[in-house]
Structure formats: C-alpha cells, structure tokens
Amino acid sequence: MLEYLDPRAEPSAPVEAYTPRIDPRRAPISIGMLANGFPDSVAFLQQIEDALRAELPEATFHHYNKGDASIVVPDEMFERITRECQAVVAAYGH
C-alpha cells in the first residue's frame, strides 16, 4: 500500500489585511530599487522597474547596490534611500 502525505499545514497565524501607507496612483512616487550585489540582482530589478513603470508612468526610480550580499545596507546608503524614496524594492540576484 502506498500512502501520500500532504506536507502543507494549516496557517497558525491569522491573516491580516495589508494597508499601504501611500497611494502611488494619487501622486507621483519615488521608488528605490535596491540590489544586494549579486550580478543578476541589478538585471532583475530592471525588469521589475519596467513593469512598475508601465503601471506608474509618473514614478521616478533611484538605483542602489549594496555591492556585497553578506552585509546590511550601510548607514549612509540607508539615510540616502529614506531621504530620496517613498517606497523601496529590495531584490536578491543569484
């Protein structure tokens, strides 16, 4: 006899609704694109930016690259991102 086990479990935490703090369709938005330093992270973020630009043509984009996937965002870069952007997309390439 062959028995199959379903590895999925019932969620243990309640689902919480996500309410964005900004509405990008109401006003132009500045979006940061943060690459982690892996070679494909920049190319991946470019694809994401292209898709976002199609939906948000008034948005402006700023590009950042940590240059090293093993570190946290340096303080100076973090301050620049928070000063220049209202939203950030962080991506990992591989």
Image (cartoon, rainbow, N blue to C red):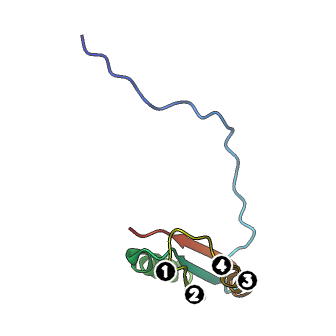
Q: Quadrant of residue 2?
A: top left
At label 4, the amino acid type is Pro
Mark 4 or mark 1: whose residue is earlier in sequence: 1
Question: For residue 79, which numbered disc appears in the image?
Answer: 3
Query: Residue 45: x percent and y percent?
Result: 46, 77
Residue situated in front as seen by the camera: 78 or 45 = 78
At label 1, the amino acid type is Glu
Q: Which label lies toward us, 2 or 3?
A: 3
Secondary structure of the residue carrying tag 3 is helix
Question: For residue 74, which numbered disc appears in the image?
Answer: 4
Query: Residue 70: x percent and y percent?
Result: 52, 68
Compared to residue 39, the image places residue 4 above or below, namely above
Q: Mark 4 and 2 residues: CB-CB less than 8 Å, in contact? A: no
Residue situated in front as seen by the camera: 48 or 70 = 70
Query: Residue 79: x percent and y percent?
Result: 73, 83
Residue occupying the point 60% across, 86% down? 59
Q: Which label lies toward us, 3 or 1?
A: 3
At label 3, the amino acid type is Glu
**Mark 2 to mark 1 CA distance (whole Å):** 8 Å
Q: In this rendering, would 5 be left or right of 45?
A: left
